[in-house]
Amino acid sequence: MNDKEVRNISSFRLFIQNFSKKKLGVICVILVFSIYLVGIFAPLIAPYDYSETNLLKTQSGPDMENLLGTDRLGRDILSRVIWGIQTTVIVTITGLLTGALILGLFLGLLAGFYRGIFDFIVMRTGELVSSFPDILLIILLAATLRPRITNFFYQIEDNLNISGLVSSGIIDYLVIGIALLPLSWFGTMRLIRAQVFSIREIEYVQSARTSGASTFRIITRHILPNVISPLIVTSTFGLGAVALSEVILSFFGLGVQPPRPSLGAMLSDVSGRGGASVSVLTNHPEQLLAPIIIIWIMIFCWNIIGDALTDILNPKKN
């Protein structure tokens, strides 16, 4: 084992030791990890399929057969919450990967390193996009893109003589992923760009440039490792925002489409937008509280984890 590997192991152990001191952060990590596991293994955990109905048992309260009761179509609330968690898990992971970890990181590295006209174009584009209210822009993109993407996939099915692309739900996640890009990429890009501005002036980076090292090697070997810490922190905060945005899109019918459940669609259905009576709120509050509690726990925990990581990874506090 070389010296670099030893240093990496020591740094990781130090990080674990410091994070273990953040008791609330540790609790939140356990909660988020448990919720994500429930979503990933929803087909195995959910007692019923999300579309299974029992018209003889509609709007019933909690009992041994249906622990959280049933909705207006006789569907098990607990099962739909579990499947809804899976939707949120998929959206947050894909939204994070496409927005923050790919587009934001890539543009931030290039804008900070090359500066000049490329930096000007990226910054002005980001400022133009961010000048719109986030939620309104996301709703506008989702409403505009869905019919066009749906027609595109229908054409693919017709041309290739295949079926199942549209019904698979891939369009829902694609629309949500594209619509959420403005929410995550610019903030990440701006943070990474600022980090690169300072790192590129450090002596060892300047030495690598004068020695003839390629741009790719300088960015990947000397700059990228030094921006990982702030990237992790900002991505953690971003996960809560992405989860909330997906809920809002589904609430307005622009996210995951029925019959596949999502936490936002469940709130919409119970609130009366989906056809349910408002009296459900008073007679069966568990139908509203179950998705709200899950959403609140996820957003709260991601914010607490982000705060804990900020305290640990901020070099000014170490």
Image (spheres, helix red, strand yellow):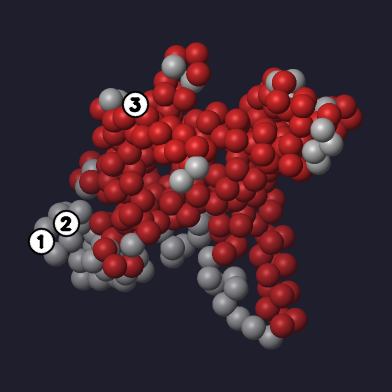
What residue is shown with label 3? 18
Kind of residue at disc 1: Met
Q: Is residue 190 left or right of residue 57?
A: right
Query: What label sits on residue 67 in the rendered view?
Result: 2
Q: Are marks 2 and 1 in contact (CB under 8 Å)?
A: yes
Q: Is residue 168 left or right of residue 145?
A: left
Q: Quadrant of residue 24?
A: top left
Kind of residue at disc 2: Leu
Kind of residue at disc 3: Asn
Label 2 – label 1 distance at C-alpha? 6 Å
Q: Is residue 139 visible from the viewing direction of this image?
A: no
Does dot 1 land on a helix, a strand or a loop? Answer: loop
Farthest-out residue, right: 117
| Vertical placement of residue 27 versus 201, above or below | below
Q: Is residue 163 visible from the viewing direction of this image?
A: yes
Label 3 – label 1 distance at C-alpha? 43 Å
Does dot 3 land on a helix, a strand or a loop? Answer: helix
Q: Front-most of 277 and 267?
A: 267
| Residue 22 horizontal/vertical position (percent) | 30, 26
Q: Nearer the viewer, mark 3 or mark 2?
A: 3
Q: Earlier in the sequence, mark 3 or mark 2?
A: 3
Q: Is residue 136 left or right of residue 268?
A: right
Q: Earlier in the sequence, mark 3 or mark 1?
A: 3
Point 40% across, 34% down: residue: 10
Badge 1 local density, few (<14 within 10 Å), some, or many (20+)? few
